[in-house]
Image (cartoon, helix red, strand yellow):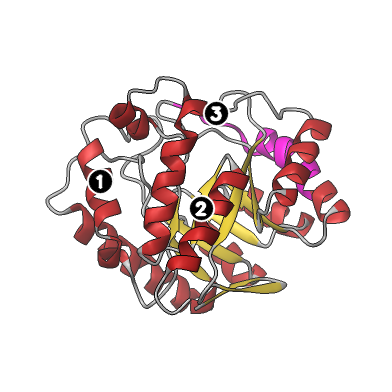
């Protein structure tokens, strides 16, 4: 199983990889404001690479529940200098831009990003066009509603079936527009328009979410449902529950994991892989 990401191809057939989260925002739920300057953002990125991250996901707009929208110009101002400098100083790093705006995605790819991670799941035809024209890898995430409304009593008849149907629809739209199927990865959007029980159902049965044999990417890091289960109020206190999910999900075949705390999750993946049948 491979993932084509513009200038490189990741082989995920036997080795999982970590996508390190780099939020250059003032209001992200876990680390908002911490990496708001260029030097701090680049230093954090270098640390995550040293700890084993294969991908860095750079985001300039918070997607926490209730988050306000950010203008295209403001988002560009936040993310482009970081991408440009990392592309220059760390050419070995695979850079991803976390955005739902086509104009930001196009500028980020031009600056050095190789992946477009869209929390709105490439519903925007302009975003699909950017993906097709650029040749970037794409992460199609499922979200019910918008960041401002997604947790307002979300409901499903069958959450696994509905998320998989969304993935199938987006796969067909992307491929029809010229995106290579090997460039597509799916993210079930844990915590995005889902209740605690919806999240657990998706985590228990990831096999229901697989579409066209494409990889799954999981992003549970420090999310509030972990706090509900473990009684931890601080986001940073949820790193170990994140590691637990990473290990179990890797055993279930999920190879890509988007996290804040890189080293512990890299170690969890490698230990789990070492114990898998046929390792």
Secondary structure type for disc 1: helix
Please tell me whether mark 2 or mark 3 is closer to you in this view: 2
Q: Earlier in the sequence, mark 2 or mark 3?
A: 3
Q: Residue at x 79, y 62 (%)?
A: 92
Q: Name the residue tied to disc 3.
A: 28
Q: Position of residue 40 (x, y in %)?
A: 78, 31
* Between 128 and 25, the one nearer to me in the picture: 25
Tally the marks. Answer: 3
Q: Name the residue tied to disc 2.
A: 268
In magenta, the rendered stretch is 67-83
Q: Earlier in the sequence, mark 1 or mark 3?
A: 3
Q: Earlier in the sequence, mark 2 or mark 1?
A: 1
Q: Position of residue 180 (x, y in %)?
A: 53, 78
* Between 238 and 190, the one nearer to me in the picture: 238
Do tag 2 and tag 1 residues touch (Cβ < 8 Å)? no
Number of the label disc, if any, that sits on residue 200: 1
Horizontal arrangement in the rendering, residue 218 relative to residue 112 (left or right): left
Examine the structure image and report whether residue 80 is included in the region drawn in magenta: yes
Q: Residues within 10 Å of mark 3 (few under 14, many from 20)?
A: some
Number of the label disc, if any, that sits on residue 236: none
Instruction: Looking at this view, name the residue that lies furthest to the right.
Output: 89
- Magenta residues: mostly which secondary structure? helix
């Amino acid at each position: 199983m491979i993932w084509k990401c513009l200038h490189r191809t990741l082989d995920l057939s036997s080795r999982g990889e970590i996508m390190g989260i780099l939020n250059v925002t003032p209001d992200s739920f876990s680390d908002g404001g911490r990496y708001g300057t260029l030097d701090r953002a680049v230093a954090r990125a270098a640390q995550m690479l040293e700890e084993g991250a294969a991908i860095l996901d750079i985001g300039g707009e918070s997607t926490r529940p209730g988050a306000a929208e950010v203008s295209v110009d403001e988002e560009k101002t936040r993310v482009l200098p970081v991408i440009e400098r990392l592309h220059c100083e760390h050419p070995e790093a695979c850079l991803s831009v976390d955005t739902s705006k086509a104009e930001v995605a196009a500028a980020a790819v031009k600056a050095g990003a190789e992946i477009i991670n869209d929390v709105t799941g490439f519903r925007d035809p302009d975003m699909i066009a950017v993906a097709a024209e650029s040749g970037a890898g794409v992460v199609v995430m499922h979200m019910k509603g918008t960041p401002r409304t997604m947790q307002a009593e979300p409901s499903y008849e069958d959450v696994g079936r509905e998320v998989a149907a969304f993935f199938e629809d987006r796969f067909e739209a992307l491929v029809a527009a010229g995106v290579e199927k090997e460039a597509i990865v799916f993210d079930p959007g844990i915590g995005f328009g889902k209740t605690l029980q919806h999240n657990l159902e998706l985590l228990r049965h990831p096999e229901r979410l697989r579409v066209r044999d494409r990889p799954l990417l999981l992003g549970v890091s420090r999310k509030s449902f972990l706090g509900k289960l473990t009684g931890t109020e601080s986001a940073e206190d949820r790193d170990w529950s994140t590691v637990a999910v990473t290990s179990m999900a890797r055993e279930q075949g999920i190879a890509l994991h988007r996290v804040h705390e890189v080293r512990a999750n890299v170690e969890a993946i490698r230990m789990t892989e070492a114990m898998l049948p046929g390792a």
